[in-house]
Image (cartoon, rainbow, N blue to C red):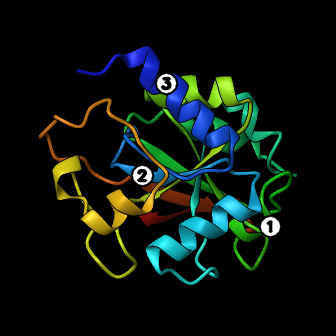
Amino acid sequence: MFVYEEDLEACLAALQKGAIILYPTDTVWGIGCDATNEVAVAKIFALKKRTDTKAMIVLVEEEQSILNYVEDAQLQVFDYIKGIHKPTTVIYQKAKNLANNLMAADGSVAIRITKDVFCKTIIKQLGKPIVSTSANLSGYPTPMCFRDISLDIIEGVDYVVKHRQDETELAQPSSIVKWDQEGNLIIIRP
């Protein structure tokens, strides 16, 4: 039997050492690391067998945090986020203060304000955002609960969070949106 606080401490210690973790989010289980650590981000790309030209999502604790990681956070984005209930990832132009290999080739970054208490606690205690990419090898389906995650992923991370492993409810990935140059909303994944 695990203790929630011990799980949090072990997860945090792993992240602080540059390790990669397998953890539950407000959507699907994710593979994560300190989003400012380029070496850790590279480990995730290698584990997923994913080309490093495909950007990954960054989780932050609160709306205010976004300002630390993008140069131009438009106000209409914050209004939109407040009005939705489904977890939604927003693509922002001109990322900053993140691992260079985490950003898309055009300098953009995908950020979501997590609603999950475990994730919020980890991010707050780490003092940095964390990477969140689905817990699957590139090209394979996204696992919708812990029991669907492949052994390659479970054995390939440095720490597996124990919290919520027994849940059987199928999760869904977040919506993904962005705004074009004229300020129009573009829905990438509903």
Tell me what residue is drawn at x 23 percent, y 37 percent.
165
Tell me what residue is drawn at x 64 percent, y 82 percent.
53
Going from N to C along the chain, the mark reached first, 3 or 2, is 3
Q: Secondary structure at mark 2?
A: strand
* Vertical position of residue 22 compared to residue 12: above or below: below
Picture coordinates of residue 15 (x, y %)? Answer: 62, 41
Q: Quadrant of the N terminus?
A: top left
What mark, if any, has residue 8 been given in the picture? 3
Number of marks: 3
Q: Is residue 48 left or right of residue 75?
A: left
Label 1 – label 3 distance at C-alpha: 27 Å
Q: Secondary structure at mark 3?
A: helix
Picture coordinates of residue 58 (x, y %)? Answer: 61, 51
Tag 1: amino acid: Asn
Q: For mark 2, what is the residue?
A: 30
Query: Are circles 3 and 2 on residues that touch, CB within 8 Å?
Result: no
Q: For mark 1, what is the residue?
A: 100
Label 1 – label 2 distance at C-alpha: 20 Å
181 vs 142, nearest the viewer: 142
Going from N to C along the chain, the mark reached first, 1 or 3, is 3
Q: Quadrant of residue 54?
A: bottom right
Tag 3: amino acid: Leu
Q: Please, which residue is most extreme toward the left here?
A: 168
Q: Quadrant of residue 140?
A: bottom left
93 vs 44, nearest the viewer: 44
* Vertical position of residue 78 compared to residue 51: above or below: above
